[in-house]
Amino acid sequence: MITPNDSRLAPLEAILYAAGKPVSLSSICALLKLSDEAEATKLIKNLSQIYESDGSPLEIRFLPEERVVLQLKPDYSKQAKFSIKPPLTTGPLRTLSYIAYNQPIEKKEVAEARGSQAYKHIKQLIGMGLVHSEKVGKDSILKTTDDFSDYLGLSRDKGNMKRQLSRLFKKLEEGTVKDKK
């Protein structure tokens, strides 16, 4: 039984905080010497409930591929304007979406579809670590990175990611996804 006084909660919190990115359940099991991922999940849910009951601006999110991340709740993003990763404006976000949905894709094909400004967007996306470029012949092949998947809470598996993006795009077209400001 896991209680709010469980001595493993502080080390778990330290692991999630120090990682600064999603951590697999298997890594948490190994680091905390837990018997299995079910025990890790219970411990994580307990810590998450503590954050929730305390009204913390932090939350723990479960992600695809049995990963979890400690992050700032979206409602507090305005207070964290000094964030290292700048928010994406509409143009680069659309270019990123196009790359993610059609990957792997040649850079020139992205520019043909999105216009010449796509080169600037691609440079920004590479700088943010959301897109990777690999030189092949005279052109470059673009793919999203694991950071992209983590950033949006999507699966790292390209097939699953494409299905998730399709559902998201459909919701956006239907107007069921509301933009939080």
Image (spheres, grey):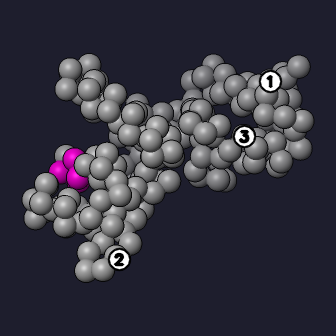
Give the spatial CA distance, label 1 vs label 2.
51 Å
**Picture layout, residue 87 above or below residue 163:** below
Q: Which residue is mark 1?
A: 4
Q: How crowded is the residue under tag 3: few (<14 C-alpha within 10 Å), some, or many (20+)?
A: many
Q: Position of residue 164 (x, y in %)?
A: 40, 33
Task: Please say whether residue 76 is one of the residues in the magenta stretch.
Answer: no
Q: Point out the frontmost of discs 3 and 1.
A: 3
Q: Position of residue 64 (x, y in %)?
A: 56, 36
Q: Position of residue 97 (x, y in %)?
A: 28, 46
The label number, if any, that marks residue 135 in the structure image: 2
Q: Residue at x 50, y 53 (%)?
A: 146
The label number, if any, that marks residue 25 in the structure image: 3
Residue 61 visible? The answer is yes
Q: Earlier in the sequence, mark 3 or mark 1?
A: 1
What segment is highlighted magenta in the picture? 91-95
Left or right of residue 96: residue 15: right
In what element is the residue under mark 2?
Answer: strand
